[in-house]
Image (spheres, rainbow, N blue to C red):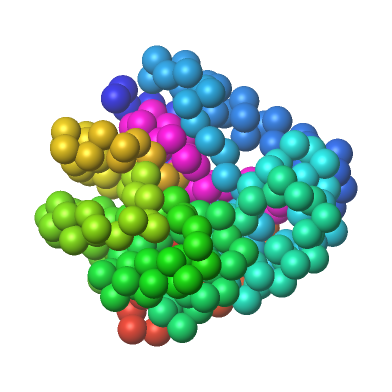
Amino acid sequence: MQNNPAIEPHAKILYPQAQTQAEISANLAMVKDKISAACLRSGRNPDAVQLLPVSKTIPSSRIQMAYAAGCRAMGENKVQEAQEKAASTQHLADLRWIVIGHLQSNKVRQVCRFASEFHALDSLKLAQALEDQLQKEGRAMDVLVQVNTSGEASKYGLQPAATVAFLHSLKDFSALKVRGLMTLAMLSTHSDQVRSCFQTLRSLRDQLQQNTPQLCELSMGMSGDFELAIEEGATIIRVGQAIFGARATSDQYYWPEKQAKVQQE
């Protein structure tokens, strides 16, 4: 794709708090305008890009405002937080909850009961736990496989070279519907470094699609870099702060440094 020097990924932006439905609606409109502009630059249809609002740290009252503004899916990192919000918004029957953060096997049962999708599958152990629980629940779940495209030890995800074998190992897991790949790009102000992560994921998806045609989705891009991600083929972008405002809770809570691992919005 063309290199757009006007885009500065991960620039230090102060995202003001959106405390009303009108403010959330205005931010959604701004993000959608940027989606359309990025699609225009790259010759894509904006309808091919799904905006996934990320509601971590956001209280249920503001999630209901986002719902009223048209949002029908929310992404969450922490299982307990997501489960509590799902319970408090049960009256919003068509609101879907998508877990996008690293998942421990002991939290699988909860996820299989409230989440519609899981976007961070990164180990065979976790896949087996999800498969077993979904079979018990009598349901299937769409999942995305997380790939570490930056090569940083601080990030979860499979190495690109290991992804083919991993997908092959899932072929008999009937309850897991693998729909695509997810990544978190390098946190850098250099667009070439960020763009390279997205290009790696798209190239990998294109390669895998030759034998796995249902592998369509590319979840990549967040508040600081989603325009670059769209230019490189993202079909799902995960946007939190650009919609709801800066978080009061430290990112270290959501991107833990334990065992040199961090997670994504």
Q: Is residue 235 magenta?
A: yes
Q: Provide residue 158's location: percent of width, then percent of height.
A: 24, 62
User: Looking at the image, how many numbered discs can be counted on the residues?
Assistant: 0
Q: Nearer the viewer, residue 193 or 37?
A: 37
Q: Is residue 80 magenta?
A: no
For the magenta stretch, what is the residue range? 222-245
Q: Provide residue 209's location: percent of width, then percent of height.
A: 22, 36
The residue at the point 32 percent across, 71 percent down is: 128
Image vertical order of residue 132 relative to residue 119, above or below: below
Kindly tell me whether residue 182 is visible in this rendering: no
The residue at the point 31 percent across, 37 percent down is: 214
Q: Nearer the viewer, residue 193 or 239?
A: 239
Q: Nearer the viewer, residue 98 or 240?
A: 98
Kindly tell me whether residue 59 is visible in this rendering: yes
Image vertical order of residue 141 relative to residue 30, above or below: below
The residue at the point 29 percent across, 75 percent down is: 125
Relative side of 105 to 80, left or right: left
Relative side of 181 to 6, left or right: left
Image vertical order of residue 145 relative to residue 23, above or below: below
The residue at the point 28 percent across, 56 percent down is: 147
Q: Nearer the viewer, residue 139 or 58?
A: 139
Q: Provide residue 47's location: percent of width, then percent of height.
A: 53, 23
In which quadrant will I find the N terminus?
Answer: top left
Q: Provide residue 164's location: percent of width, then percent of height.
A: 15, 52
